[in-house]
Image (cartoon, rainbow, N blue to C red):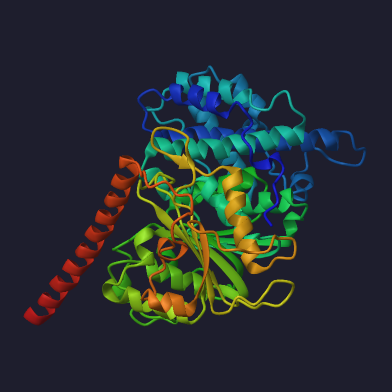
Amino acid sequence: MAKQANNNGANLGFEAQLWAAADKLRGNMEPSDYKHVALGLIFLKYISDAFEAKRAELLEQELADAEDPEEYLAENVFWVPKEARWSHLQAMARQTTIGKDIDNAMLAIEASNASLKGVLPKDYARPALNKVMLGELIDLVSGIGMAEEADRSRDILGRVYEYFLGGFAGAEGKRGGEFYTPRSVVHLLVEMLEPYRGRVYDPCCGSGGMFVQSERFVEAHGGHIGDIAIYGQESNYTTWRLARMNLAVRGIDADIRWNNEGSFHKDELPDLKADFILANPPFNVSDWGGERLREDTRWTFGVPPAGNANYAWLQHIHHHLAPNGTAGVVLANGSMSTATSGEGDIRRALVEADAVDCMIALPGQLFYSTQIPACLWFLTRNKDPGGECRDRGGEVLFIDASKLGHMVDRTRREFSDEEIGRIADKYHAWHGAPDAMPYEDEPGFCKSASLEEIRNHAHVLTPGRYVGAATDEDDDVSFEERFAELKETLAEQFIEADQLSRQIQEKLETLGG
């Protein structure tokens, strides 16, 4: 049964006002550029505050040397040289040299902390960056957490950093979705998988939100942070830097690799077998270089089409699961039903191998990168891992959450904590978790289907085909909902038509050659 976490994940109450003030300062500057300016300063404030708190402790200890970097590194606190400390930068905020001062501070921190080498932004001195705006932004950041005790102050800075990541993702729109998975989606994945202990992996980790939520989940449920080990890869260097800063702000030690060739072509962690995998790969990628990977040990269930990476991601993720591992993967809705380019055969093979544990249909407008609905795939290596849960062999749980969520602004929807709890509780009940209520199908919401039922639906995994209609469902579906569904269907048909067109063109070129 999903337990309600403490207030660890809740907003602090002032992030929106702080974001509005910071966003106003950027003026005409593009959010994609300003993002690194603001987040870099929040990061600098965080490590400086953590350093000063530790320094105050050392000054009270007779035998400790408050100016010895080793004293800090031993406690997983970054060493901050004098010229990089926030108090120094705050004093210089109104000087015309402030941009250069910040760059020098970033360079000094990287020189003193090997794990941050190449991570921090160092272009604050560029002429195009307004130095008055920079000084005002330093003043704004200076006030974060000032009235709080040291640990609470750092926690506040960490949450502000996370809130700003989401704010920039929203400001950048589709491009922002490439580095940020909305918090309520991550929260749902984490509550369902419950990564209390073991190895946690994300092969396309973006700015690291999956990891932050996993560590927060462990803390919220009374576990020890050291009980999980975190691994990840990210192909975009700029996004990898954001992830490293995001994790450092949270004090999370992780093995996150920058891999410019991507997880398919240069698997940085080829021998990793993870207990939990959480991933939000880019949807329907057509230029993933699949034509160069026709033979690969990862393609256990069939060779994925060169024109769409969805089933390559699913198989890469399944390949990296430990014997009792489970994975939660965000994919485009079309992945549940497509029969294009052999994808239907791969899906059938996944189902028949009992690798599919649960399928969830999501509502539209959850993501910054697309307005159409997506879905969640839950994969497993073993449906009877022993312990207190039941053997789920030959069954798949379908959940239709497409009508859940509430609009938080004009364009984006979120799940509430109660809705996340409802979905996660059903999943754990179906697993037979010892503290869960007995599982029951709920018309219109969830259904435990046998492999035979799935075969009768030609291995299509769309939850709506299985859960049926709610007993009290109102037939009055709004025009907006019907229109969104039609747009989704049309978008998926365009993708499949484009893939088919490319394949025909390739065949014609082969025949012509």
Q: Tell me what residue is drawn at x 73 percent, y 23 percent.
A: 147
Answer above or below: position of 157 versus 143: below
Q: How many numbered markers are drawn?
A: 0
User: Residue 387 in the image: x percent, y percent?
Assistant: 74, 74
Q: Tell me what residue is drawn at x 63 percent, y 64 percent.
A: 439
Of all residues shown, which one is farthest toward the front?
Answer: 471
Answer above or below: position of 513 versus 340: below
Which quadrant of the figure has residue 150?
top right
Q: Front-most of 211 and 87? A: 211
* Residue 492 visible in the shown view: yes
Q: Tell me what residue is drawn at x 68 percent, y 64 percent.
A: 438
Q: Front-most of 84 and 265? A: 265
As drawn, is 26 to the left or to the right of 63?
left
* Residue 208 visible in the shown view: no
Q: Front-most of 267 and 82? A: 267
User: Residue 296 in the image: x percent, y percent?
Assistant: 40, 81
In the rendered view of the protein, which quadrant contains the N terminus? bottom right
Which quadrant of the figure has residue 512?
bottom left
Which quadrant of the figure has residue 440?
bottom right
Q: Tell me what residue is drawn at x 44 percent, y 33 percent.
A: 409
As drawn, is 140 to the left or to the right of 179?
right
Q: Front-most of 54 and 442? A: 442
User: Residue 331 in the image: x percent, y percent?
Assistant: 42, 60
Of all residues shown, which one is farthest toward the right?
Answer: 62
Answer above or below: position of 83 versus 309: above
User: Residue 28 in the image: x percent, y percent?
Assistant: 35, 25
In the rendered view of the protein, which quadrant contains the C terminus? bottom left
